Amino acid sequence: MFFVFAVLRIRGFKVSGFVDFKTSSWVMLQNEKRFTGVCHGTVGEIIQGPFHINRNISISVISLHARKFSWVHFMNSDCDNIEHVAKEKPRSMKAIDLYGALHKTKRPKGEWGFYSELVTGKGMSSSTADIVATIRCLDKINGRVTDQKSVSKILKGIERSDSVFINRYALYLSDMQQTVRTFSSKPQLHCYYIDEGGRVETEGTYELLLMHYRKKLREYSRNLDSAISAFDNRDYRRLAECATQSAILSQNVLPKKNLDSFLNYKEHFGADGIFVAHTGTLIGYLYARNPLETMVADVAAFARSLGHQIQYTQAGF
């Protein structure tokens, strides 16, 4: 094959790629008027609980980062669908406006498109991932990279969120949009989970959580210290046990219908821990090493007996 790099204009679009002169085929590398931003979501948290800062209690999370994604697309065009964005994706719309105010850039004119594997109201960080993917798409359009501090600033103006924009595990204050610390270890954790159904609106849980945390400060503090130590020592089975303890503590405020069943069969299925979406509808088993398919089949049968389909994702980076 004989390839020659070329830049062409096709129907007003500037595209770059290679021409194969033997077959007269065109391999497109990039369309310079199309841009895409992407951000992963979560399947809940390893832990969620109180964190003391300036004599106040903040909501802290260490998220279970999942390989499920939100994509935001933009194409320069005379057909501007920004009104549709404002109606269907109001938080992304606000991110577009806050981004422009922060960087002093004009709102781009064209067509926006959204696609997500993250279901809203489940505790998968769907709206935060949409916002971060929107910011990253705007970065592509403007040829820049918005730093983490600025991303936090934009998020703070929109919603309580987590650390999906940070490329490592982090202890993050979701209500203050502040990173307490990141962890150098990056465990690959295997998550087999069910969706119990329904939806949870995160914004409606804030005061409820703080009231609960004040009653259980000692237990939460002990579990947080253990989780931090587990990260620092790369003790991922202990980390999974911290997830179990966090799920149990959360049962007194946002209960999961199937937690007792999962606890009863945890050892039978050789799980290292149990995780939940604390302000969502997910609950599942956590493994530091992926189990054999025969065990996965047994876990799936167990989930089916509860009336649910087992789902899987790998958490980590």
Image (tube, rainbow, N blue to C red):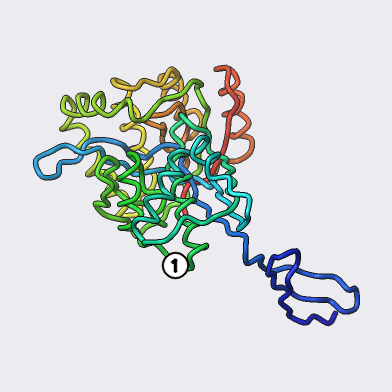
Rendered residue at 44%/50% (across/down):
96
Q: In this view, does 144 lie above or below 164?
A: below
Quarter of the figure that contains the N terminus: bottom right
Quarter holding residue 175: top left
Looking at the image, which is closer to me, 112 or 206?
Answer: 112
Element on which disc 1 rests: loop
Looking at the image, which is closer to me, 275 or 281?
Answer: 281
Whether residue 288 is visible, yes or no, is no
Rendered residue at 47%/57% (across/down):
136
Whether residue 280 is visible, yes or no, is yes
Quarter holding residue 50: top left
Residue 242 in the image: x percent, y percent? 32, 38
Q: Is residue 307 above or below residue 203?
A: above
Quarter holding residue 211: top left
Residue 42 in the image: x percent, y percent? 46, 42
Q: How many marks?
A: 1
Residue 261 in the image: x percent, y percent? 45, 19
Looking at the image, which is closer to me, 296 or 47?
Answer: 47
Residue projecting furthest to the front: 78
Rendered residue at 63%/56% (across/down):
77
Question: What residue is shown with label 1?
Answer: 144
Residue projecting furthest to the left: 55
For label 1, the crowd category at 10 Å Cα-Cα, with few meaning under 14, some 14 to 19 and many 20 or more, is few
Residue 134 in the image: x percent, y percent? 48, 51
Identify residue type, mark 1.
Arg
222 relative position to 147: left or right: left
